[in-house]
């Protein structure tokens, strides 16, 4: 059973040490501007090799903090980091090559290139729900881009954070990569420093505070946030496929996934059949006795979050929601059974707060337009999921809504596609990660132009004679005609 973080507090914050490490990384940042692909790949491999050397110990740490099954640790923590590392190592030389854009009409006679330059000293603040992959995954991208990094993992998964600290200490000198455990005090001390880039994964509320702190030093930011990601099961959906994939994506890591379906809209004509499919799958996966924790289900991170989710569930039931499966709550064991609800009143808190736990509200609809309006009435989510065999209907839902990403006839797996940008929009995030998109996130695209003696811009130099005015006007008229 996971233990509350108050039982194993993180080490106290050493503000002087943080400042010393930050200062040492300045020289590294300057030196790494000229680092080669081979040097960067070597650092990435050092990270991965050291992480894998701690594989069994990390399994134990995840069991202690989250009660996470070893198979989920392998699939959702190790695999994403190693995939990022594999792609970065294989493609980094190509990513680093300057792009050579063609000159525009008014820039004829010039030669231009876009060079990817490291941003500099970088701060990565990672959350507790996927503490390894959401810390080391961005670290791979930051190292690929040539940046020294300071990492701040969550204090709510102390066993994993402590093991990660050992990995970083073995793999790197702190002048290159350092990890600081600690509470919010540590995070605030780090945010007071003038980093060149900050990569934050967490809640929208904390993300706003991070962005405000970054503004003090005009640091660039990447925010991977969350929100109430909706799912839609259309009348034409393959109900068995929808139930299999949605029940996996929702209850993976006990629902503590930023891109997990928060609630699902189901067409009225198939709702009962869909719920029955979901019940069969959940009972087969987690056991018929929903009163006891299942070995293949992770636990809620701590009692505080268990109480929060239990309150949302109790509020919905008190207001008239119908329990279709689950509902068992054990605060001491951080356990809430996989739960399905329907007939939920619109004023229930569970429809207005991000759940981030093993409870799925099922909402009925008859008109697709009504679902689209309901999705658009909320802040833009991190993900949108649609199950349908009608391509026109799917295209309409995707085109008329906005979300960080979307997935058709599956869920959550878009995160694993490292050639796709992963990120939110507005309230669900800012910027992108993964693969080349992660490399760009931690890089500055520096524009470099080399002129030549035949540079046409001389026509714009004073003195502005009548003949020069006629020449400039002719160029403007030409551009206007070409742009029609």
Image (cartoon, rainbow, N blue to C red):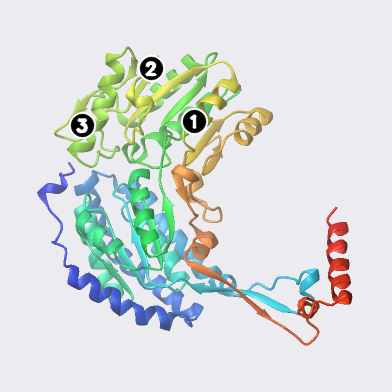
Residue 471: percent from the left, percent from the top? 87, 72
CA–CA distance in space, label 1 to label 3:
25 Å
Q: Using a 10 Å C-alpha cutoff, classify the residue at mark 3 as few (fewer than 14 neighbours), some (14 to 19) or many (20 or more).
A: some
Residue 444: percent from the left, percent from the top? 52, 69
Residue 344: mark? 2
Residue 231: mark? 1
Q: Secondary structure at mark 1?
A: strand
| Relative to 61, 36 lies left or right | right
Residue 332: percent from the left, percent from the top? 13, 33
| Relative to 16, 241 lies left or right | right
Residue displayed at 31% across by 31% down: 286
Residue displayed at 39% across by 22% down: 279
Residue 133 visible, this angle:
no
Residue 157: percent from the left, percent from the top? 22, 51
Residue sticking out furthest to the bottom: 453
Are the residues flagged by discs 1 and 3 in contact, CB closer than 8 Å? no
Q: Secondary structure at mark 3?
A: helix
- Sequence-wise, the earlier of marks 1 and 3 is 1
């Amino acid at each position: 059973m996971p233990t509350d973080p108050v039982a194993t507090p993180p080490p106290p914050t050493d503000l002087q040490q943080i400042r010393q490490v930050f200062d040492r990384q300045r020289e590294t940042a300057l030196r790494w501007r000229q680092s080669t692909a081979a040097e960067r790949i070597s650092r990435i491999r050092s990270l991965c090799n050291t992480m894998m050397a701690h594989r069994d110990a990390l399994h134990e740490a995840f069991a202690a903090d989250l009660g996470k099954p070893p198979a989920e640790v392998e699939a959702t923590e190790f695999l994403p980091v190693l995939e990022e590392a594999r792609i970065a190592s294989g493609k980094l030389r190509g990513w680093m090559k300057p792009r050579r854009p063609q000159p525009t009409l008014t820039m004829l006679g010039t030669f231009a290139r876009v060079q990817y330059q490291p941003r500099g000293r970088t701060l990565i603040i990672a959350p507790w729900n996927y503490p390894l992959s959401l810390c080391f995954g961005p670290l791979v991208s930051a190292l690929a881009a040539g940046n020294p990094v300071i990492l701040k993992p969550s204090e709510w998964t102390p066993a994993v954070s402590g093991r990660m600290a050992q990995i970083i200490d073995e793999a790197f000198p702190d002048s290159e990569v350092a990890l600081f455990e600690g509470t919010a005090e540590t995070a605030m001390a780090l945010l007071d420093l003038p980093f060149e880039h900050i990569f934050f994964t967490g809640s929208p509320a904390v993300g706003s505070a991070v962005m405000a702190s970054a503004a003090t030093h005009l640091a660039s930011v990447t925010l991977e946030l969350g929100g109430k990601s909706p799912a839609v099961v259309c009348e034409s959906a393959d109900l068995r496929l929808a139930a299999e994939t949605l029940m996996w994506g929702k209850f993976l890591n006990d629902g503590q996934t930023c891109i997990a379906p928060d609630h699902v809209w189901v067409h009225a004509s198939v709702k009962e059949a869909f719920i029955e499919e979901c019940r069969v799958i959940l009972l087969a996966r987690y056991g018929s006795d929903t009163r006891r924790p299942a070995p293949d289900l992770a636990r809620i991170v701590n009692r505080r979050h268990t109480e929060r989710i239990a309150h949302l569930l109790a509020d919905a039931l008190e207001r008239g929601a119908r329990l279709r499966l689950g509902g068992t709550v054990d605060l001491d064991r951080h356990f809430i059974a996989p739960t399905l609800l329907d007939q939920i009143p619109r004023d229930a808190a569970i429809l207005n707060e991000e759940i981030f736990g093993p409870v799925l509200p099922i909402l009925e609809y008859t008109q697709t337009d009504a679902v689209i309006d309901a999705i658009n009435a909320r802040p833009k989510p991190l993900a949108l999921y649609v199950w349908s065999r009608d391509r026109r209907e799917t295209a309409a839902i995707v085109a008329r809504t906005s979300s960080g990403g979307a997935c058709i006839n599956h869920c959550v797996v878009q995160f694993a596609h490292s050639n796709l940008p992963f990120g939110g929009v507005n309230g669900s995030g800012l910027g992108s990660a993964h693969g080349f998109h992660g490399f760009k996130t931690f890089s500055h695209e520096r524009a470099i132009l080399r002129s030549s003696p035949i540079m046409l811009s001389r026509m714009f130099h004073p003195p502005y004679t009548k003949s020069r005015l006629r020449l400039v006007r002719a160029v403007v008229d030409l551009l206007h005609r070409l742009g029609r």
